[in-house]
Amino acid sequence: MIDEATVKKIAFLSKLKVDDENMNEVKSEFNGIVDWFEQLKDVNTDNVEPLLCVNEQKLHMREDVVTVENNSEAILKNAPVTEYGYFVVPKVVE
């Protein structure tokens, strides 16, 4: 059972804004998701082979050849901030 503290932690980590008036609704939705995963434990998979791929199509292999020269300077001109030849982005994970 997911409580309000867990909802707040998940919301913080996933950058979701959960207002206090929506807390019970979000908590109910999260608990519904957890309940659904609990139902999956009851599925009998004894004679089911693991899938390597969901479709049986064979992918055509091609030779790995460089077709574009290094144009990082032109690409970095699109960035608002660069440093040492890389894009500078805001930190999103604490």
Image (cartoon, rainbow, N blue to C red):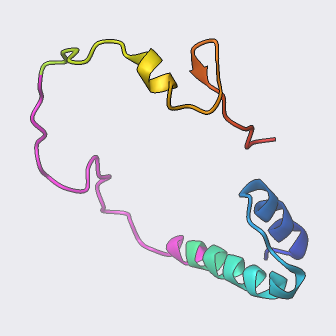
Left/right of residue 57 with respect to residue 92 in the rendered view: left
Residue 79 image offset from top left, x and y in percent: 56, 31
Using the rendered view, name the quadrant where residue 70 is placed: top left
In front of the other: 85 or 12:
85
**Main SS of the magenta segment?**
loop
Query: What residue do we see at 75% from left, 42% from top?
Result: 93
Left/right of residue 65 with respect to residue 60 in the rendered view: right
| Quadrant into which the N terminus falls | bottom right
| Vertical placement of residue 33 versus 69, above or below | below
Residue 94 image offset from top left, x and y in percent: 82, 41
Q: Which residues are magenta?
A: 38-62
Query: What residue do we see at 51% from left, 73% from top?
Result: 40
Instruction: Tell me, yes or no, whether the highlighted magenta stretch contains residue 52.
Output: yes
Instruction: Tell me, yes or no, whether the highlighted magenta stretch contains residue 82.
Output: no
Using the rendered view, name the quadrant where residue 82 is placed: top right
Left/right of residue 22 with respect to residue 88 in the rendered view: right
In front of the other: 34 or 42:
34
| Vertical placement of residue 48 versus 3, above or below | above
| Vertical placement of residue 65 versus 24, above or below | above
Residue 32 image offset from top left, x and y in percent: 64, 82
Residue 71 image offset from top left, x and y in percent: 37, 16
Query: What residue do we see at 58% from left, 20% from top?
Result: 86
